[in-house]
Image (cartoon, rainbow, N blue to C red):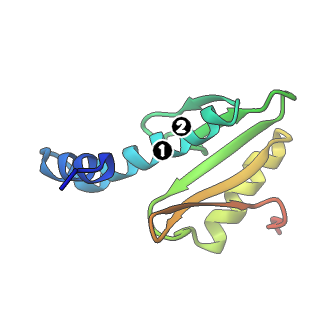
Amino acid sequence: MKKTAKKVLSKSVLKKKGNFNYRSGRYFEYRVKKYFDDKGYLTFRMAGSHSCADIIAISNAGIPHLIQCKTSGGGMTEKERKAFVLKVHKFNCVAILAYKEKRKLVFGYLGDCKPD
């Protein structure tokens, strides 16, 4: 039986010492970053998440996308979404929420979530 890269990678992530939630979140951020890299975006991962976005992706047209990554099915409260959208729209950027749904990448456009 041939091992797939996903199985080997997930096993290696589980075996390493340290905070599992941090490692799985970091792995997910790199997965989202690679998705946008493959689409031709210029991407930056904001390590430590002390900024409002986990990833900044700039399209060929020069449009910045600020991406918040959540490993738990879109786990942002309405208050967190509004705060994120307020910060992002302040700089005329596109707000995107990236999350997993049954191991698949899902992207949600948060532009319609207007702050009060």
Residue position marked by numbered label 1 in the rendering: 31
Looking at the picture, tell me which residue is in the foreground, 96 or 6.
6
Q: Report, in whole angstroms, how far the alpha carbon at label 2 lies from the one at label 1.
A: 5 Å
User: Residue at the spot x=62%, y=34% of the render?
Assistant: 38
Quarter the N terminus occupies: bottom left
Residue 57 disc label: none
User: Residue at the spot x=81%, y=42% of the render?
Assistant: 93
Query: How many marks overall?
Result: 2
Q: Quadrant of residue 79?
A: bottom right
Dot 1: within a 10 Å radius of its alpha carbon, few (fewer than 14), some, or many (20 or more) residues?
Answer: few
Q: Quadrant of residue 71?
A: bottom left
User: Residue at the spot x=73%, y=48% of the render?
Assistant: 87
Q: Position of 102 compared to 115: left or right?
A: left
Tell me if label 2 and label 1 are in contact, CB under 8 Å.
yes
Dot 2: within a 10 Å radius of its alpha carbon, few (fewer than 14), some, or many (20 or more) residues?
Answer: some
Q: Is 19 above or below relative to 116?
A: above
The amino acid type found where label 1 is placed reads: Arg
Residue 19 percent coordinates (x, y): 21, 50
User: Residue at the spot x=82%, y=48% of the render?
Assistant: 89
Q: Position of 114 compared to 40: left or right?
A: right
Residue 99 percent coordinates (x, y): 54, 61
Residue position marked by numbered label 2 in the rendering: 34
Looking at the picture, tell me which residue is in the foreground, 28 or 39.
39
Residue 39 percent coordinates (x, y): 69, 36
Residue 33 percent coordinates (x, y): 55, 38
Quarter the C terminus occupies: bottom right
Q: What secondary structure is found at the residue carrying circle 1? A: helix
Q: Position of 32 compared to 40: left or right?
A: left
The amino acid type found where label 2 is placed reads: Lys
Q: What secondary structure is found at the residue carrying circle 2? A: helix
